[in-house]
Image (spheres, helix red, strand yellow):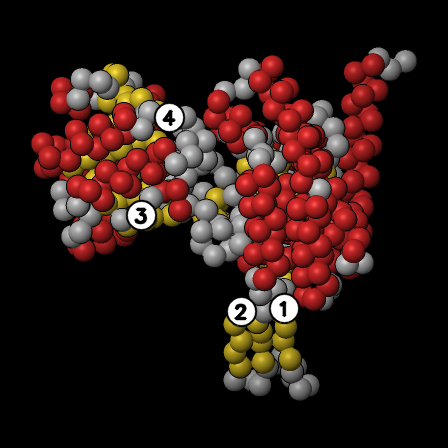
Amino acid sequence: MLNVNEEAHQDTVALMAGIGRRARAAARPLAIATAERKHAALVAMAGAIVRREQEILNANALDMANGAEAGLSAAMLDRLKLDKQRIRAIADGIRAIAELRDPVGDVIAEWDRPNGLHIERVRTPLGVVGVIYESRPNVTADAGALCLKAGNAVILRGGSDSLNSSGAIHACLVEGLEAAGLPQDAIQLVPVSDRAAVGEMLKGLGGNLDVIIPRGGRSLVERVQTEARVPVFAHLEGICHIYIDKSASLDMAVKLAVNAKMRRTGICGAAETLLVDRAVASTHLVPVLEALRDAGCAIRADDEVRAAFADAEPATEQDWRTEYLDAIISAKLVDGVAGAIGHIEKYSSHHTEAIVAEDAATVEKFFNEIDSAILLHNASTQFADGGEFGMGAEIGIATGKMHARGPVGVEQLTSFKYRVRGSGQVRP
């Protein structure tokens, strides 16, 4: 006789198997759906988001209340929170994706062989994508819309803290699919918070899942990378750096450092470590730190920085390895761009790094020698975002090196195949 836990586990296994089968069945008609039909679905989804705004806000209020009761941090609650402005931004993001050029069928490259064969490399959908994410209910819309645009079916598994919000948004996506005559199962949301559902996705749902994209904290990503039996687009934590060079404009350095850290502290593109060239410690360091402090940021620093700025707390070795996702930044003096590069290569998660500098040779050295997915010159790290890159939206920032790197947008959600056209050639 099965106990309650065993029965619940079996129910989840059966649930996920059904979701996988339905996603695979939906993937085939979706892969050959016209660009016009996908566009119509996305426009209808955006309209439903706007029309059902109050339903989404009510659902989010439940999640926010539950999150506060569960003791979520202020940064996590900020990730979870929806308001009218953020809902409008979700709808606008879907519309932006709708207006992107459909990548499916694009001829990436073509060439002729001496034997007369004509070869084309052509974009194709990946198939069925699994997205596992935490807190952010807007990922439900971004991931669903991006996968649809790229001709993929998608299985969305949001965090338990955003289950009500994600459910309300998902209902709008399904409404859009129905309006355009596309399979409802093209975008499915896992309706339970049981962690066993993640385990089933990592096993590949009986061969029905082609790739997994995790978006969340280190523990989630490490679990996915360790246990997944299907390819993973890894999105590791964002330990992002901003380096202020001796050639930097002080006014620009102050403005960019405050924005990179404080615009939104809970996003993966927020700067977590400030590096300042020792050559301008007497001119740039204190004004930048004062501006951060005045903006409400706590500062943890090495002894050299603390000697110049008494309001800083001592930094430990762990601080250089920490994604705070909060109004906290670690600060250190380094010996020029070479010192910054050395620190970043030791501690970075290879997500996003920025340099503030006017010297072109210094910028080129920074760009050439740092191996992170996104590098910025004289711009805030908060621009590490698919929407800001003109991709409409993103599922995440991939920090691995295989297939996709940086913002995972529509093109990154495709694979390719070769089409070879001949005129009767045989191989000797």
Indicate left or right for 167 with 98 as reference. Answer: right
Packing grade of label 2 (10 A; few <14, some 14-19, many >=20) is few
Q: Is residue 38 visible?
A: no
Cα separation, mark 4 vs mark 1, equals 45 Å
- Specify the amino acid type for callout 2: Ile
Cα separation, mark 3 vs mark 4, equals 20 Å
Packing grade of label 1 (10 A; few <14, some 14-19, many >=20) is some
Mark 4 highlights which residue?
327
Q: Nearer the viewer, mark 2 or mark 3?
A: 3
Which numbered disc flags the more N-terminal residue, 3 or 4?
Answer: 4
Mark 2 highlights which residue?
108
In which image quadrant can residue 115 be found? Answer: bottom right
Which numbered disc flags the more N-terminal residue, 4 or 2?
Answer: 2
For the N terminus, the image quarter is top right
What residue appears at the point 27 percent right and 26 percent down from the top-left corner? Answer: 294
What residue appears at the point 63 percent right and 72 percent down from the top-left corner? Answer: 419
Indicate left or right for 62 with 270 as reference. Answer: right
Mark 1 highlights which residue?
105
